[in-house]
Amino acid sequence: MCENLISVVTALGSPKIIVAGDFMLDVYVYGDALRISPEAPVPVLRVTETEYRCGGAGSVAVDLAALGAAPICIGVTGDDQNGKILREKLADAGADIDGLLGAADRPTVSKQRLIGLAQHRHRQQLMRIDREFAGPLPQQLCDRILATYKQRLAESDAVCLQDYDKGLLDGDICRNMVEQAGRLQKKVLIDPSLTADYSKYTGATLITPNRREASAAAGIEIKDPDTAEKAADKLMKQCALDAVVITLDKEGAYLKTADEGQMIATRARSVYDVTGAGDMVLATLAAALAAGCDYGTAVRLSNITGGIEVEKFGTASVSVQDVVNEILSHNRGRHGKLRPVELLLSELAWRRTQNRTIVFTNGCFDVLHRGHVEYLKFCKSQGDIVVVGLNSDNSVRTIKGPGRPVNNQQDRAEVLGALESVDYIVIFDDPTPQKLIETVRPDVLVKGEDWAQKGVVGREFVESCGGRVVLAPLVEGKSSTATIKRINSLGTKS
């Protein structure tokens, strides 16, 4: 599963995805809150910083761009300073903003959060100030939005509708957008607003309500997978959808399609801020489905990106590299640093896309001592990622004799894995590491300087591929064989 998800997320490509809906500007005003006002029982906020981020549909667009997609923004902003800032932030993120129309009679929707910093570190939201006008758009502006949408639809690979009930995706516009996309067989993914009536979403491909939204729309209180399935099934039939994904906070998400219904769990996290999590989920689902993923894989990826997002403060995007690092970190936490060859190659392929230098060394590492520790530190100094080829028990016996190894291969791998200088461990059964070196194709091959005269196995191959071979200095008098002999001699004396 780990290898598959890495392959998927690194091959999402750059699909063009329309993002239509309620574009907002999130404003974060940070300050020290160290005293209470003498005028009223409220904190005094001494402002130290103001930060602007894209919110609502703008958050979805930025999230898509972070995943490598090409978002096409269609919506409305006010002709004001907040609108100017929002457009600049979207453009800087790589979004196409030609479809963002200005409206002189309404402000850019903005949410200003006052954030107090206790002891200059701990962020605590004190208040949110909203500026908006959520009334219906003038008909002339609606016509322009739909004309722009129709023009850009043909070149798009999918459509995201982000509905915060701020006036843009009213019944007629939303139905029109879904119908137009359906005629061109474009997938439409919708993050719905909190309403009991989902009729305007009828005919979409997928909706992604959270627990509260799905409960309100289906009239079923969602408490567990059974009630989630009932709610999802009802919504799918009522709105003629291909799929429903109900996000269920720390429990993960419930996926319902015509062929299956399944609870897709996520790992437990320390939730810092849920702002923007739904936007991230919608963006991930859209990017994954546009890239040809099945629903199950798309939801698993969205669980990961949504989970990463809630560990950040405010609306924050998640990149492909963030996802890969999360998958690798989770896999390492479950299985340590030991890898089968196939999974190792997949992870190294991603590391290489980040221009990481791969260092390889090998050995028995039977009784770990200071010489080993210094040697592996030296390996780490030669590049970014250190891969240790560890001789299997059978291989050690062939090399060292029937009395070795003292520690079995699993124990040796665990001890090696505790060293910060080691990134990956792979066990090999051959007498020499030649075959493994040819498989890993390291940029740097390291062996101890005692191999200078014996000849370094794999040297010719590594150098033929443009890599280099480095001989590491050894700590005098330190070896597993010497350590074992000393231990045996002490036992004899006693």
Image (tube, rainbow, N blue to C red):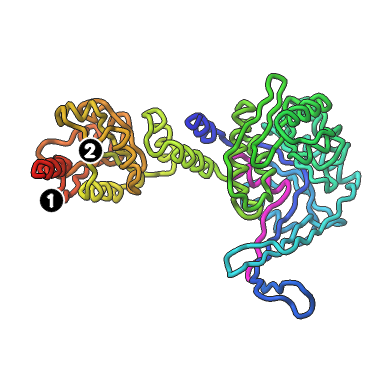
289 within the magenta span: no
Q: Quadrant of residue 462?
A: top left
x%, y% of residue 94?
A: 62, 47
User: Which residue is situated farthest in the top direction here?
Assistant: 259
Q: Which mark is residue 218?
A: none
| Position of 438 relative to 39 (above/below) | above
Quarter holding the C terminus is: top left
Q: Is residue 184 left or right of residue 352?
A: right
Count the numbered circles shown: 2
Amino acid type assigned to the residue bearing label 2 in the image: Asp
User: Residue 107 versus residue 256: which sits nearer the camera?
Assistant: 256
| Bounds of the magenta segment | 48-71
First in sequence: mark 2 or mark 1?
2
x%, y% of residue 168?
A: 83, 45
Q: Residue at x 28, y 41 (%)?
A: 444
x%, y% of residue 187?
A: 71, 29
The reply to whether residue 385 is in sight is yes
Q: Is residue 288 left or right of residue 202?
A: left
What is the spatial separation of the Cα atoms under label 2 and label 1, in whole angstroms?
Answer: 18 Å
Q: Is residue 48 left or right of residue 112?
A: left
Q: Which residue is mark 2?
A: 366
The reply to whether residue 152 is in sight is no
